[in-house]
């Protein structure tokens, strides 16, 4: 009976809508439940182990795309670019502390989400000295050591802005950086989030940039069916620290809802860090792009 329940719970990961969202959040912990039942069966009823084979296999297939992976190692012909992202929790008063902690990591690009007016002002003041280039709109902002071009606000179907796109001019090549603060998910209120995720997927599909990185708070667990459109157009960045990269809640991370997606970039490492007093951990990702062609390099 326990095996059947666990099998149903895992299969729900492929069901669109709120069921799939909830199942995706619970997926890693369903594996823990399977392991506990297997240990109990090992001592009390070994025949039950056979009944757990199917749920275990289905769970492995469901969790595989979200498992940690290796980085590519530092590139020898390009300068690494470190991009960090964190939801700083509006009205928490911790944006400046988060910004300072993230800058101390040596980040080249800092993306912050769930900004309010006060937290935007505080973060901007904390980063002004080291990050001369910035752009913010709505609840999202980005700060860069390198020049920023083509800054564009994105509504992704909403009536207000919770996303942006900028082009960061690194020494090696231009990188399109998207920052997303997806709408929250509550029972009966999932449409806005799903619409935004479809919108960001379409935006990157239409984007002609050779190098793209998308970061932010997606409000969707790694295996959520709502991420399928984004996954089909970009590479999901796996944590390279041997963990599942859980980001929320920061005090005891249970689910990864803050993600990194790339196209045309080599990923060297990706991990999570505590910063400030936010209820989200930050994502810290190091990537690199190919050297800019001499013909396309900017003049002096």
Image (tube, rainbow, N blue to C red):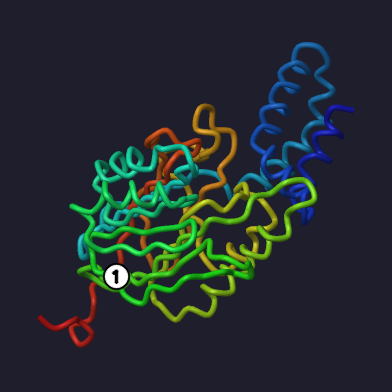
Question: Can you tell which quarter of the image residue 28 is in?
Answer: top right
Q: Residue furthest front?
A: 118
Q: For the N terminus, give its image quadrant.
A: top right
Residue 99 position, x and y percent, is 32, 44
Q: Secondary structure at mark 1?
A: strand
Q: Is residue 285 above or below residue 34?
A: below
Question: Can you tell which quarter of the image residue 8 is in?
Answer: top right
Q: Give me the residue at 54% from left, 37% from top.
A: 248
Q: Give me the residue at 69% from left, 49% from top.
A: 185
Q: For the C terminus, give its image quadrant.
A: bottom left
Can the viewer see residue 72 in this picture?
Answer: no
Task: Determine whether, in the image, residue 267 is placed left or right of residue 145.
Answer: right
Q: Is residue 208 above or below residue 264?
A: below
Q: What residue sits right under mark 1 in the picture?
A: 148
Residue 240 position, x and y percent, is 42, 44
Q: Give me the residue at 20% from left, 60% from top.
A: 76
Task: Determine whether, in the image, residue 69 is placed left or right of residue 103.
Answer: right
Q: Residue furthest top?
A: 43
Can the viewer see residue 87 in this picture?
Answer: yes
Q: Nearer the viewer, residue 115 or 102?
A: 115
Task: Determine whether, in the image, residue 213 is placed left or right of residue 246.
Answer: left
Residue 196 position, x and y percent, is 62, 64
Q: Nearer the viewer, residue 157 or 71?
A: 157
Residue 54 position, x and y percent, is 79, 39
Task: Determine whether, in the image, residue 300 is placed left or right of residue 211.
Answer: left
């Amino acid at each position: 009976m326990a095996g059947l329940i666990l099998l149903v719970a895992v299969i729900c990961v492929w069901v669109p809508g709120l069921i799939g969202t909830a199942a995706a959040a619970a997926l890693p912990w369903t594996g823990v439940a399977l392991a506990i039942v297997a240990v109990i069966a090992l001592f009390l009823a070994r025949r039950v182990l056979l009944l757990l084979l199917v749920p275990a296999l289905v769970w492995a297939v469901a969790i595989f795309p979200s498992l940690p992976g290796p980085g590519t190692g530092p590139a020898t012909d390009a300068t690494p670019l470190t991009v960090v992202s964190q939801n700083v929790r509006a009205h928490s008063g911790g944006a400046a502390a988060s910004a300072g902690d993230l800058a101390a990591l040596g980040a080249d690009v800092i993306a912050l989400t769930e900004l309010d007016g006060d937290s935007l002002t505080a973060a901007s003041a904390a980063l002004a000295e080291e990050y001369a280039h910035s752009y913010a709109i709505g609840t999202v902002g980005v700060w860069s050591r390198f020049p920023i071009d083509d800054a564009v606000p994105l509504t992704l179907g909403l009536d207000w802005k919770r996303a942006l796109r900028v082009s960061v001019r690194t020494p090696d090549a231009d990188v399109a950086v998207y920052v997303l603060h997806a709408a929250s998910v509550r029972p009966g209120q999932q449409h806005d989030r799903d619409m935004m995720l479809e919108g960001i997927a379409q935006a990157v599909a239409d984007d002609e940039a050779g190098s793209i990185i998308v970061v932010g708070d997606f409000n969707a667990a790694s295996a959520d069916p709502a991420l399928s459109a984004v996954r089909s157009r970009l590479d999901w960045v796996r944590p390279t620290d041997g963990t599942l990269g859980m980001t929320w809640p920061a005090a005891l991370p249970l689910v990864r809802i803050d993600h990194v997606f790339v196209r045309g970039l080599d990923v060297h490492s990706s991990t999570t860090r505590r910063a400030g007093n936010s209820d989200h951990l930050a994502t810290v990702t190091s990537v690199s792009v190919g050297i800019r062609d001499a013909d396309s390099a900017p003049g002096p």
